[in-house]
Image (spheres, rainbow, N blue to C red):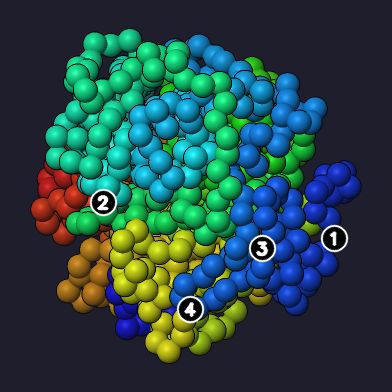
Amino acid sequence: MVVRKETTIDTLLHENRIFHPDESFTAQANIKDREIYSRARANPEAYWAEQAEHLDWFERWDKVLEWNPPFAKWFVNGRLNVCHNCVDRHIYTWRKNKAAIIFEGEPGDSRVLTYWDLYREVNRFAAVLKQLGVEKGDRVAIYLPMIPELAVAMLACARIGAPHSIVFGGFSAESLRDRIDDAQAKLVITADGGWRRGKIVQLKKNVDTAVEQTPSVEKVLVIRRTGNEINMQDGRDVWFDDVVKDAPETCPCEALDSEHMLFILYTSGTTGKPKGVVHTTGGYLVGASTTHRMVFDIKDEDVYWCTADIGWVTGHSYVVYGPLCNGATTVIYEGAPDWPDQGRFWAIIEKYGVNIFYTAPTAIRAFMKWGEEWPAKYDLSSLRLLGSVGEPINPEAWIWYHKYIGGEKCPIVDTWWQTETGAIMISPLPGLTPLKPGSATIPLPGIDVDVVDKNGNPVMLGKGGFLVIKKPWPSMLRTIYGDDQRYVDTYWSKIPGQCVYFAGDGARRDYHNYYWILGRVDDVINVAGHRLSTMEIESALVDHPYVAESAAIGKSHDLKGQAVSVFVTLKAHAWQEVKEGKKTEIQNELKAHVVKKIGAIARPDDVFFTAELPKTRSGKIMRRLLRDIAEGRALGDTSTLADPAVVAELKKKYEHKES
């Protein structure tokens, strides 16, 4: 990534609505003392040591932090085990028979694993890994659907000290191959298939193709899920059902150094050599468990549901490791949010009495598009807190979420963080922080962030710049697997003369010191010298009652350098008006609405209507492909697209200027 020569980002959209914490919520909140911020600021190492006391340690650390910029070691010489903290320690308490995992399969099957069930399953799975020759330090690739065995496999790897590399089940055989090869995985864990919108995803078939070119793989362990016919290669492929019968009932936890590698996670959308983000044991678990406890105000009686796939970092930290470390009940759902209909998420919330719901803005905008009549069919009164993750949330999507899902009573924790940060960095604490729709609010205790210009100087309040993290934190990535120099160059060398973590996101701080994430630096549109945030333009469009979702890009312009083009998904009633011949009228109305909300400089030159926007399988809009379409270029890498047909249709429309 290259930091462009311009110093700051122009920010023109302003949001003034404020939602204060309800007194009754604050009274019961886990964190209700504002002193926590000043204490953490005064002595960050003492603060993080205090949080680390929530974990079980086999041997206590000698030193909290060893910082040789940009390389960090946290809780130096401490020894612990993530699986012990997530499973074993709970079985000696009343939580032994508490639900650890509630699983809902897409076809409607369900299972509940108590902490005792989870303990037994993880022990047996870890014993199987050892029988297959996996030793401490060996890498294990996991390519599974969203089933309980995915969490069990992770924990089993952590139990014996074998770093896991989970590859999202929607990735292709080629993507899987590259990740297995880079990690030099010894074992691949997969399933015959998984369910997605009523169809079987051929996971084992993809593994067969991938491992043809990955000589490091010695065994493939296969879990039965869908029952479809698959190829099983003699000497390499093993059914889990067959080998677990003879496995020992117990497998002791390894006492691991705090800096022992827990997992590698490859960032989505990479081109060329995969970028494997390395997270280690002690610091990562301190970060994930602390933020889960504080941000989600987790209580023992809560049913907690993060909708992310475990193949992404959100699933690692906030489906599995954070919740289970805190002894929570976590929901895992296998399938799509609109299968068999668009009420599936709300049906799950009603069925299990979900109290805390954490999902992505792209999902929220899909819910808006489908209409409030869907959640209205279900009893969502069990909800007490909502969360948002993955990208900036448009203020109007925030308001919709608050009104129709939260019943105007649930605080919303809008969280900013990354695969590389391991845990949430900027977020409200729901019992303390007044909320502003669209803002992630302020950094969490112990996190030191800033907004700077290209020279590293803090920008004025209200102005946009580059988001940086100024001091190390426990859950930070330690390196890029096998490539320390790439780690230094990518994250720690962008601001001259300063060793600060460069997030790659634009941001601004308002006059209350609240942070507004403006999207990726590469998504900024440069119109006549003004650097406009795509997030602000998209938020202005979603503010209009006709718009469900939008994506803004810059395309080349002879006079202005770049002009704004927007791709818009309309709500059902607006589509009807387009069919009735009001297309141009609606396009002009949306252009005028952007001018009203932001200013004439942001007026879109083009407004294109589309039934769907191109997204990755994790739900992020692929603006890069939209720019390729607008500029008439050949399309770049499309391997992470959820639905390639969406791009093909858009390209056809754009080339013929049919909107």
Q: Is residue 112 in view from this perspective? A: yes
Q: Which mark is residue 33?
A: 1
Secondary structure state at the residue bearing disc 4: loop
Closer to the chain start, of discs 3 and 1, is: 1
Which residue is identified by label 4?
69
Which residue is identified by label 3?
61
Name the amino acid type tagged 1.
Asp
CA neighbours of label 1 inside 10 A, class few (<14), some (14 to 19), many (20+) = few
Secondary structure state at the residue bearing disc 2: helix
Q: Residue 476: give x, y in percent of width and height.
A: 51, 62
Q: Residue 50: give x, y in percent of width and height.
A: 76, 61
Q: Nearer the viewer, mark 2 or mark 1?
A: 2
Q: Which of marks 3 and 1 is in front?
A: 3
Labelled pair 3, 2 in contact (Cβ < 8 Å): no
Q: Residue 182 carries which label?
A: 2
Closer to the chain start, of discs 4 and 3, is: 3
Q: Is residue 644 in view from this perspective? A: no
Q: Residue 527: give x, y in percent of width and height.
A: 32, 73
Q: Residue at x 69, y 71 (%)?
A: 45
Closer to the chain start, of discs 4 and 1, is: 1
Q: Residue 639 carries which label?
A: none
Q: Which of marks 4 and 3 is in front?
A: 3
Closer to the chain start, of discs 2 and 1, is: 1
Q: Residue 109: give x, y in percent of width and height.
A: 50, 11
Secondary structure state at the residue bearing disc 1: loop
Q: Distance between the residues labelled 4 and 2?
A: 25 Å
